Image (tube, rainbow, N blue to C red):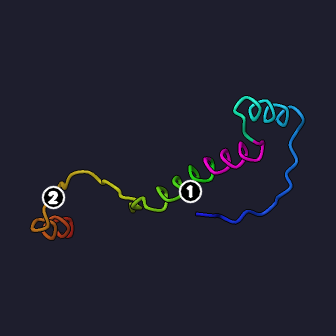
Amino acid sequence: MHVSMQKLQILFPDPLLDMLRRLAKAEDLPVSEIVRRAVDRDVNQRAALLMRERDKVRKFPTFNGGAVLVGAHKMKSLIHADDA
């Protein structure tokens, strides 16, 4: 499968570019391949993270007011007892 490539100019600080060149030489690969693999890995990790975040089920906030102290059947008599 052939994937078309496009050229992109990227500026690197000298120490990072030196390290990339050393890695490329040690692995017998072009610097561009080292960069493509690193970017591919980073982009895939970020995309997976975004997908996990998107798929999380959002829970509505809840409030626990505690146990029921008076049943509904006694509520009316308790409310109106003070009026007597």
Comparing 21 with 45, the one in front is 21
State the residue at coordinates (41%, 61%). Answer: 58
Q: Quadrant of the C terminus?
A: bottom left
The amino acid marked with disc number 1 is Ala
Measure how far apart labels 2 and 1 are at the Cα level.
Answer: 52 Å
The secondary structure type at the circle numbered 1 is: helix
- Counting residues from the start of the chain, the first of labels 2 and 1 encountered is 1
Q: Quadrant of the N terminus?
A: bottom right
Q: Quadrant of residue 18?
A: top right
Comparing 47 with 68, the one in front is 47
Comparing 69 with 78, the one in front is 69
On screen, residue 54 versus residue 16, left or right, reads left
Which residue position is annotated with label 2?
70
The amino acid marked with disc number 2 is Val
Dot 1 surroundings within 10 Å: few (below 14), some, or many (20 or more)? few
In the displayed structure, 75 sits above or below 44; it is below
Q: Which mark is residue 47?
A: 1
What span is colored magenta in the figure?
30-41
In the displayed structure, 80 sits above or below 62; it is below
User: What is the magenta segment's predominant secondary structure?
Assistant: helix
